[in-house]
Image: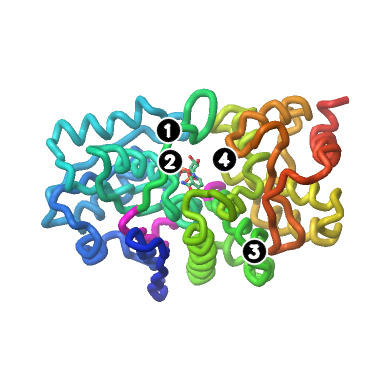
């Protein structure tokens, strides 16, 4: 089914760029021609996405001098050593400093490719072609790029904006249900952060989204990208309000790190993390019990976990949260809610309530 094509803009002065959203966009040459001021183009992808979409993208890049590098698939490969393979290929093929990288894949490929573009010859152009829902609504927009270190996720990286983002909703056809749900976690996040109307729309539309209704998915992608673009434009380098995008992420990172990357998906960890943030907000008297129930219900209907794994008890959670890069000095800084669609970044809350939340979720372990 064809859906209407939509274009948004991320406003960042001379680094502004468009986001194109529609079905069947990735094999349309005009998007690449319009935004790639280069002759040499390296497509970076992975071994799962390459057989699905690489040929189509290379076809659309006819007229450019193209090459590709296919990385192993998985968060465990988001490392400096695997990342280095992109440079091996660029140098082997004598790509110059006017070249362009195209990231074709999910958030892992996008983050690694963007970081490679930031560093190769001190910075070359890059284009995002995100193929997971999570990458389409979140990681491909905003210019955060990087790789993991054994001691922390996304600890090495750069802010580096793409020339454009090409979101082909048709690529979601091949994405499995679990990955689709993981993307919906980030979609729900935007409603909670600052878009109560969107949250209400999600409550009405969640079954269509889970059922892969393309019109509903396009609408959710557009609204998510629009919400993210506003936050990024206001605070590109996360000096302040952009940190709202980390709702659920401090708890979520603790879950991901505590279990070892790859057990829970990023979006699943964020989903449980948002439920924990809602629980803490309710304990502080900032949201009502009815709002907490609505939040959990929507996340559950999206097919996502609403509780963290019981194997992580309070002490382990605290330990994991204190190595998170969003921790300032000794007090944990969290994104919490003052209502659905009303969030804040704060260290100024009763830390005993945090302990109560961790005890609630880890109670079997803490006994
Ligand atoms: N830069 C940011 O602002 C930002 C924001 C959120 C998340 N992230 C990062 O994004 C990563 C998670 O991204 P993700 O959820 O896309 O994971 P991912 O990139 O690992 O992709 C998930 C899986 O789907 C496969 N896949 C991708 N597209 C497919 C398609 N169309 N059909 C079938 N399979 C497909 C991938 O090969 C992979 O196996 C994490 O590393 C996280 O840190 C970055």
Between disc 3 and disc 4, whose residue precedes?
3
Q: Nearer the viewer, residue 296 or 233?
A: 233
3D distance between C-alphas at marks 2 and 4: 12 Å
Give me the disc on residue 194: 3
Residue beneath disc 4: 265
Q: Nearer the viewer, residue 6 or 336?
A: 336
**Which mark is in front, 3 or 4?**
3
Identity of the residue drawn at 58% across and 32% down:
263
Q: Is residue 351 left or right of 259 when viewed as pictured?
A: right
**Which mark is in front, 3 or 2?**
3
Q: Is residue 160 left or right of 275 when viewed as pictured?
A: left
**Residue 213 showing in the rendered view:** no
Between disc 1 and disc 3, whose residue precedes?
1
**Which mark is in front, 2 or 4?**
2
Q: Are marks 3 and 4 in contact (CB under 8 Å)?
A: no
Which type of secondary structure does the marked residue at label 3 adopt?
A: helix
Query: Is ligand 1 within 8 Å of the beta carbon of the residue shown at mark 2?
Result: yes
Q: Nearer the viewer, residue 236 or 62?
A: 236
3D distance between C-alphas at marks 3 and 2: 26 Å
The 10 Å Cα crowd at callout 4, few under 14, some 14 to 19, many 20 or more, is some
Q: Is residue 174 magenta?
A: yes
Give the quarter of the figure containing the N terminus: bottom left
Identity of the residue drawn at 60% across and 48% down:
246
3D distance between C-alphas at marks 1 and 3: 31 Å
Query: Is ligand 1 within 8 Å of the beta carbon of the residue shown at mark 1?
Result: yes
């Amino acid at each position: 089914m064809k859906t209407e094509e939509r274009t948004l803009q991320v406003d960042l002065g001379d680094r502004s760029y468009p986001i194109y959203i529609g079905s069947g966009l990735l094999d349309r040459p005009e998007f690449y021609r319009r935004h790639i001021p280069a002759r040499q183009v390296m497509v970076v992808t992975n071994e799962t996405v390459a057989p699905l979409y690489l040929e189509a993208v290379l076809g659309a890049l006819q007229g450019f001098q193209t090459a590709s590098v296919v990385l192993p698939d998985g968060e465990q490969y988001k490392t400096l050593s695997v990342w280095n393979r992109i440079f091996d290929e660029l140098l082997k093929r004598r790509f110059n400093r006017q070249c362009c990288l195209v990231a074709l894949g999910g958030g892992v490929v996008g983050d690694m490719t963007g970081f490679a573009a930031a560093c190769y010859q001190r910075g070359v152009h890059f284009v995002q072609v995100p193929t997971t829902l999570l990458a389409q609504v979140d990681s491909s927009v905003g210019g955060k790029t990087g790789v993991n270190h054994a001691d922390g996720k996304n600890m090495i990286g750069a802010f580096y904006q793409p020339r454009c983002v090409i979101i082909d909703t048709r690529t979601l056809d091949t994405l499995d249900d679990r990955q689709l749900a993981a993307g919906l976690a980030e979609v729900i996040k935007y409603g909670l952060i600052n878009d109560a109307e969107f949250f209400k729309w999600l409550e009405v539309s969640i079954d269509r989204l889970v059922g892969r209704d393309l019109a509903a998915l396009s609408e959710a992608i557009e609204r998510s990208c629009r919400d993210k673009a506003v936050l990024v434009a206001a605070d590109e380098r996360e000096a302040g309000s952009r940190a709202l995008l980390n709702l659920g992420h401090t708890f979520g990172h603790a879950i991901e790190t505590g279990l070892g990357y790859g057990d829970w998906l990023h979006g699943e960890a964020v989903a449980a993390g948002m439920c924990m943030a809602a629980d803490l907000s309710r304990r502080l008297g900032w949201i009502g019990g009815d709002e907490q129930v609505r939040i959990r219900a929507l996340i559950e209907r999206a097919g996502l976990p609403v509780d963290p794994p019981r194997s992580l008890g309070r002490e382990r959670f605290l330990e994991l949260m204190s190595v998170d890069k969003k921790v300032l000095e000794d007090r944990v800084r969290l994104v919490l809610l003052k209502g659905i669609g009303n969030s804040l970044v704060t260290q100024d809350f009763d830390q005993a309530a945090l302990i109560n939340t961790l005890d609630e979720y880890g109670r079997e372990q803490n006994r």
